[in-house]
Structures are given as structure tokens and as C-alpha cells.
Amino acid sequence: MEVNVTQTQRERPMGITALAPWYGSKRTLADRIIHHVGPHSAYWEPFCGSMAVLFAKEPSRQETVNDLHGDLINLARIVADPKLAPELEWRLRRTLVHEGLYRETIAWLKNPEADREGVERAYRYFVRSWMGMNGVAGTAVRCNFARRFTSNGGCPAVRFASAVDSLPWWHQRLRHVAIYQGDAIDLCEKIEDKEGTAIYLDPPYLEKSDEYVHDFADPDHLRLATTLRRFTKTRCVVSYYDHPKLVELYPGWHKIDLHINRAMANANRAKTSLAPEVLLVNQAPITQTAKEAA
């Protein structure tokens, strides 16, 4: 079975606009974020997570994504590989959504002797992500099998099938993207400061959390902010939850409010809260969209 690599972004709309149902994913904000990233020829995303922002934007001449999360990066590399992507898709299209496989997969991923990369690892991580509860990929939260006991909301099996159906588009989109796995701040220290370059950063939030697999402490936030101050030609856009410390960390930067209602499922119930999302931009803001001005 071959993955169709001839379909373009416009020819085939995606079913799912993220590689995994990531905690804090920017799927619902992606279009607004891209608006403020602005025109560019080189694009960098040091904390790529689900890659929802990358998937929302038009391809540029040079694109690089990075994340410390090994399973996410392995999945991205397999999806992008023209030889290995068809094997992954072939297996997933023959996979039914059921709790026994999900529990077996969780045990397999926890086994220290299991393969750390390759198609098998990508398959297992895909199953864990898309058969599990929404919004916990990339976290240390216990991930339970997705269940529905009401007629509201979507069907877990339909969601899984939609993610599998999105694989050919993901493959096409990632074919010309450089995929790194490393420290985001180290990467930012190496990026050339040049006009036409844009960096979008989505670091862990300032409020300390046990949610992230790779979290940030206060010194990490300070180091990131200090590193980004060296960019005068490159356009930098940083996502955070609003916090008083942002004024100290990013003095003189422009703050743009992107408040939304965000839901995250935990082991027992769904929690919905107002997420005070903001963007910090080191250059003049781009004219607001009608949606933001409303």
C-alpha cells in the first residue's frame, strides 16, 4: 500500500490538524497565531508539540520543528519517511479501537526494553495518543482509554479513524520540514538573526505544573527570555498564559490577548476553564483580525 504523496494542502483538507491530541495544543488558535507570525521565508518552532501551528500555515522555503519529546519526534519522523509511512498507515488501518489493545500499548511503552524509535514505537504512540482521552498527550498525566457514556461529543472510534485518514496529508506536509529533537533554548541560541525569519515558541506555562513530561522552572523561563532578546531582525512570537512575570521577562514586547475556553479531560471528568492565552511579540503587531477586534 502506498501513501499518496501528490496531494497538496489545498487539494486535500486534513481531517485532524494535529499530530497528537497535545496538552495545551494550539489547534483552535493556530490561524490567529499564524496571522501574528506574519510573512516569512524561514520558520522555526522550537517547542513544536502537536505541530498544529505548522500544519495551519502555508509552507515556507525553510521550516524546522523541534521538541524534546522522543515519542512525538519519532512519530513525526516515521510519518515523514516515504518508505516507513506506508507501513505505519497499513498497520493503523487494520487496527480496531478497543481497550485491550490500549492497555497492552501502555504497558509496551512503559517497558524500558522496548524499542525507543522506529515504526513499532510510532504505532504504539499513535494508539496511545488517539485511543486515549483528549488533551493529555505530551503530559505525565495518567492517560485512560477514551470512553463516552453520553450522546454528546464525538465518538472515540471516529476520532481515531480521522487521525489515520490524516496520515497521507501529514506525510506530505512534513516531507520538506527539518525535524529536530533537542533543547529548545540551545536551538534558539544558534538560529541566525535575519529578516524574513520567524520563530514561534510555545514553552511550558509559568505556573508550575506536573502535567508536562518536560517542564520548565523559573530559571528556564528567564534563560529563554534572555536568549530571545538577541533577535532584532527575526520576528519572535511566544505563547503563554497571562502572568505578572511576563512584564519582567519580556520588557518592551507587545502583548496580544487570545483568551479562549479550554477543556482538558482528566481521569474522572472534563474541566473547562477560561485560558488567558497571550502572545508576546518582539516587533510591531500586525493589524488585528476581525475576530480579535470583536
Image (cartoon, rainbow, N blue to C red):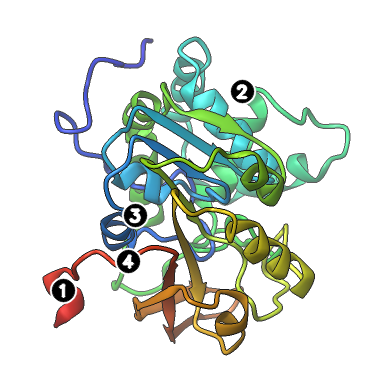
Look at the picture and state if 13 lies above or below 155: above
Q: Element under label 2? A: helix
Residue type highlighted by circle 3: Val
Q: Which residue was labeled with disc 4?
A: 284
Q: Nearer the viewer, mark 4 or mark 3?
A: 4
Q: Residue at x 26, y 38 (%)?
A: 58
Residue type highlighted by circle 4: Ala
Q: Which residue was labeled with disc 3?
A: 37
Q: Element under label 1? A: helix
**Cα distance between the residues tagged 2 and 3:** 34 Å
Q: Nearer the viewer, residue 235 or 278?
A: 235
Q: Residue at x 58, y 56 (%)?
A: 137
Residue type highlighted by circle 1: Lys
Q: Nearer the viewer, mark 1 or mark 3?
A: 3
**Cα distance between the residues tagged 4 and 1:** 19 Å
Q: Nearer the viewer, residue 119 or 227?
A: 227
x, y (%) of residue 30? 33, 57
